[in-house]
Amino acid sequence: MPVLVEVNSGHESSKTSVLPEAVDELVIQMSKLKYLCVEGLMTMEPRFGDPEESRPYFKAIRKVFERIAARNLPNMTMRFLSMGMSNNY
């Protein structure tokens, strides 16, 4: 089953996804699951009026994505990085 891991990039209490500092360990554990394939990360940054305020969150998650991809874990392709909504552009 291909999956994306949702990351709570803004540490928002209203969101239940994994925190950025816990993503590595979660993905390591998920890579041991035979029928799961981690294909990337997804995140929704905190809501701002100005899309420019989202950039630091997107940059941080991109670094997490690249760090995890460099691990070359089994059952992981890290092909996708889904960030934000269309109003962020």
Image (spheres, rainbow, N blue to C red):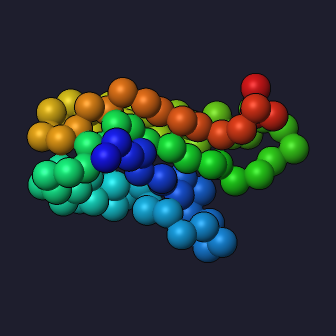
Picture quarter with the C terminus: top right
The spot of residue 44 in percent (x, y) is 63, 49
Q: In the drawing, does residue 86 fall left or right of residue 44? A: right
Depth check: 23 or 57 in front? 23
Q: Residue at x 32, y 32 (%)?
A: 78
Q: Is residue 60 visible?
A: no
From what the image shows, is residue 66 above or below residue 35?
above
Depth check: 12 or 82 in front? 82
Q: Residue at x 84, y 38 (%)?
A: 50
The spot of residue 30 in percent (x, y) is 22, 56
Q: In the drawing, does residue 25 fall left or right of residue 14? A: left
Depth check: 65 or 76 in front? 76
Residue projecting furthest to the bottom: 13
Q: In the drawing, does residue 69 fall left or right of residue 72? A: right
Q: Residue at x 18, y 41 (%)?
A: 75
Question: On the image, which quarter does residue 88 sit in?
Answer: top right
Question: On the image, which quarter does residue 71 sit in?
Answer: top left
The spot of residue 15 in percent (x, y) is 60, 67
From what the image shows, is residue 47 above or below residue 2?
below
From what the image shows, is residue 15 above or below residue 77?
below
Q: How many numbered callouts?
A: 0
Q: Is residue 42 visible?
A: yes
Question: On the image, which quarter does residue 57 sit in?
Answer: top right
